[in-house]
Amino acid sequence: MPRQADRSSIGQLMKNDMDRIADVEIRENTESLRLLMSKLYKRNPRELKKSTSGSVEEMVNWVFDGDHRWEFEAINNRQDTAALFLAFDPQYQGDRVLPYIVGLHTMLLKAHGWKTEFFFLDSIDPQRLYNVARNVEIAAWKLANARNSKGQLYLLSNEINEQERNLSFEREIGKIVGRTDLYAITLAEKSERTITRVMQNLATAIFLPF
């Protein structure tokens, strides 16, 4: 887990409390996405094999730490909602975990101005964060419910049966939604801006602009 910077350092002196909260929010959400990617590959090993003969850890590290600017030829450089659509496209034959995680992470990055560390002059729109949180909820619904023409889930995640009740995927995505919502609401109150709230049926919801 990334180490939190010493608040007495020169960089920390250039931050206010909201900057520090943003640092924590994007850092913790990134860690959740790394964990989610790892769990999805372990639950769907066939997807990993479409991308690499290496290990889950190597693939996750390459995606999050590699020098690719979040542009991957394997998914035609798609990002945010375009990547999420690809993950559940019936015609797509590639690794579905890759566009799913890339879509989620690039949505968050774009809403934060492509930054992962924040200072006095940085500006984040709380409405964009709120909309991204709603999009993450839609993506979570698709993960749990979207099926191919044979009635099979595109990606296996949560499992509920007589022997096992595993909702760890749902909980991890819920953490991302919760952190993003909390920061959006806190930022809106601090900056005296209003968030337009949207209520949607997840089964028929469309991704919101951000």
Image (cartoon, helix red, strand yellow):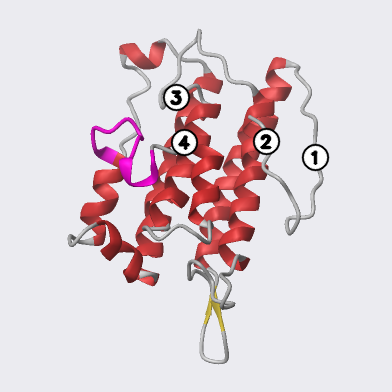
The residue drawn where x is 33% and y is 25% is 6
Q: Vertical placement of 43 versus 198: above or below?
A: below
| Quadrant of the rendering where the C terminus is positioned | top right
Q: Nearer the viewer, residue 63 or 186?
A: 63
Q: Quadrant of residue 70?
A: top left
* Residue lying at the far top of the rendered structure: 121
Picture disc at residue 106: 4
Q: Is residue 47 visible?
A: yes
Q: CA distance from mark 1 to mark 4?
A: 22 Å
- State the image coordinates of residue 77 (x, y, percent, origin top left): 39, 37
Q: Which of the two discs, 4 and 3, labels the residue nearer the N terminus?
A: 4
Q: Vertical placement of 137 versus 27: above or below?
A: below
Picture disc at residue 1: none
The residue drawn where x is 41% and y is 63% is 40
- State the image coordinates of residue 119 (x, y, percent, origin top left): 45, 14
- State the image coordinates of residue 173 (x, y, percent, origin top left): 54, 54
Picture disc at residue 198: 1
Residue that numbered label 3 is attached to: 114
Q: CA distance from mark 2 to mark 4?
A: 14 Å
User: Callout 4: few (<14), some (14-19), or many (20+) C-alpha neighbours within 10 Å?
Assistant: some
Q: Please, what is the three-letter code of the amino acid marked with disc 1?
A: Val
Q: Which of the two discs, 1 and 3, labels the residue nearer the N terminus?
A: 3
Residue that numbered label 2 is attached to: 131
**Contact? badges 2 and 1 (CB < 8 Å):** yes
Q: Is residue 1 visible?
A: no
Q: Quadrant of residue 208?
A: top right
> Secondary structure under badge 3?
loop
Where does the magenta region start and end? 65-76
* Magenta stretch: dominant secondary structure: loop
* Residue lying at the far left of the rendered structure: 54
